[in-house]
Amino acid sequence: MKVLGIETSCDETACGIVEDGRTVLANSIYSQANEHAKYGGVIPELASRRQIEEIVNVYESALARAALSAEGVDVIAVTTKPGLIGSLLVGVNFAKALAFYYNKPIVAVDHIMGHIAANYITYPELEPPFLCLTVSGGHTSILLVKTYTSYKIIGTTHDDAAGEAFDKVGRALGLEYPAGKKIDELAALGNSKRYGLPHPKVEGCEFDFSFSGLKTAVINTLHNLAQRSEQVDIADMAASFQNVVVEILTEKFIKAAFYLKINKLCLSGGVSANKQLRSTLEQKCKTHGFNLFMPELEFCGDNGAMIASQGYYEFKNGNIIDLKKDDF
Ligand code: KG4
Ligand code: ZN
C-alpha cells in the first residue's frame, strides 16, 4: 500500500511516498529556513504564503521520484496538528482536494506521531511499545508509545522546547535561524567546561523539562562579558550550552526508562540530529543494556515520509476521515 504524506505544519513544504509504512519511495522537501533567517525566526504569514506557492511543485516532485501517477497513490495522509494554522491549512486543503478528485481515503496525522514514525522507516523491525524522547523546535517530551496510534505523555517541557532553546541561544550568539545545527558544529570545536551554566530545577514531575532558565543564563553571561568588555568564545559557549541540554535530556530519559522498566528507547524530532545527543544516548544505552533506535539524519527534521509512514498505521487502525461528515 502506497501512502502519500503531506507535511506543512511550519516552514517546510514536504511530500513523501512510503510503501507499507516502511519503504520510502520519495521524500521531497522545500525548506524556507533561509528566508526566515533574516528575521531570526519563522514569520507565520510568510510561511503560509510560501507553502501555497510550493505545495504543487513538491507534490509533483515526490510523484516523479516515486515514478508514480496520482492514481497510483492508495491513501493520502496529512499533518493536521500541531503547527502554524495558516501553514497547516495549506496542506490540509491540498490533501482534501486530492482526496475528493481522485476518490482516495484520507487520514489525519499528528505531527508528533509523525516524528515518532521516522523510526519505523529507519528500523523495519521496530514495533511499539517503546519509550520515545521527542525533541524538536516546538516540542520536548518523553512519550510512552503504547501502540502505533497511541501514546502517553510521561514528561514534557514547562516552557521552551529544546530546539527553541538552541535557536534562541543561537540568535544571542549571532548565529542564523535555525541555529541547532550550527551550535552542534561549533560545540564540537569548543570547551564545554568554559562557562558554568545551571541545570534548571523543575517543580512537580521529575520527568518534566525547563529550558528557558538555561537560555536566560546564557544571555546573562553574554551581557556580563560585554559589560566587562570581554569577548565571548562562541564555540566554548555553544559547547557549554549544548552539554547541559544533552545532560538534562539523557538523564531524564534514562531515569524514565528505569522507572517504567522499558528497555526499548527511541529518539525523534529535529534535535535528534544532534551529534552529542546521539553519541551520549548511544553510550548510556550500551552501559545500561537498553536497545536504542534513532532516525537516519534525513528523517530527523520535518519531512513527508514520516507522515506517510504514520498515515499507513492510522489507515490500518481505521482512522479514515469522511470528508462529507468529519470536521478537521
Ligand atoms: O522537528 P523539526 O524539524 O521542526 C519542529 O517540529 O519544530 O525541528 C527543528 C528544530 C530547530 O529548532 C532546529 O534548530 C533543531 O531542530 N535542530 C537541531 C539540530 N538540527 C536541527 N538542534 C540541535 N542539533 C542539531 N544538529
Ligand atoms: Zn517537527
Image (cartoon, helix red, strand yellow):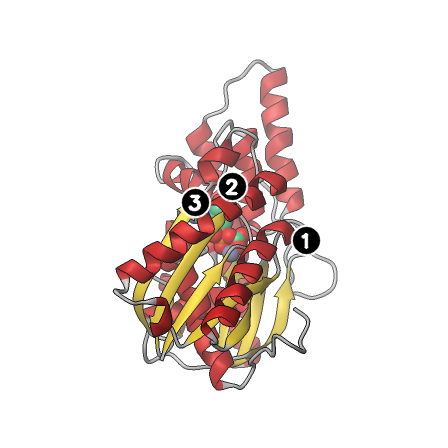
Q: Which residue is mark 1?
A: 201
CA distance separating discs 2 and 1: 16 Å
CA distance separating discs 3 and 1: 36 Å
Q: Which residue is mark 3?
A: 31
CA distance separating discs 3 and 2: 26 Å
Q: Is residue 283 left or right of residue 183?
A: left
Badge 3 or badge 2: first in the primary sequence: 3
Determine whether label 3 and label 1 are within 8 Å by CB: no
Could you tell me which quadrant the C terminus lies in? bottom right
Q: Identify the disc placed on residue 109.
A: none
Q: Residue furthest right?
A: 203
Residue 85 in percent (x, y) is at 65, 53
When the figure is inspected, residue 269 is found, relative to residue 71, above or below; the finding is above
* Mark 1 secondary-structure assignment: loop
In the image, what residue type sits under mark 2?
Phe
Residue 234 in percent (x, y) is at 46, 29
In the image, what residue type sits under mark 3?
Ser
- Residue 302 visible here: yes
Q: Identify the disc placed on residue 241.
A: 2
Could you tell me which quadrant the N terminus lies in? bottom left
Residue 66 in percent (x, y) is at 28, 64
Badge 2 or badge 1: first in the primary sequence: 1
- Identify the residue shown where x is 43% and y is 45%: 31
Badge 3 or badge 1: first in the primary sequence: 3
User: Which one is closest to the eye, mark 3 or mark 2?
Assistant: 3
Q: Residue furthest front?
A: 101
Q: Looking at the image, which is closer to me, 40 or 188?
A: 40
Q: Residues within 10 Å of mark 3 (few under 14, many from 20)?
A: some
Q: Looking at the image, which is closer to me, 227 or 74?
A: 74
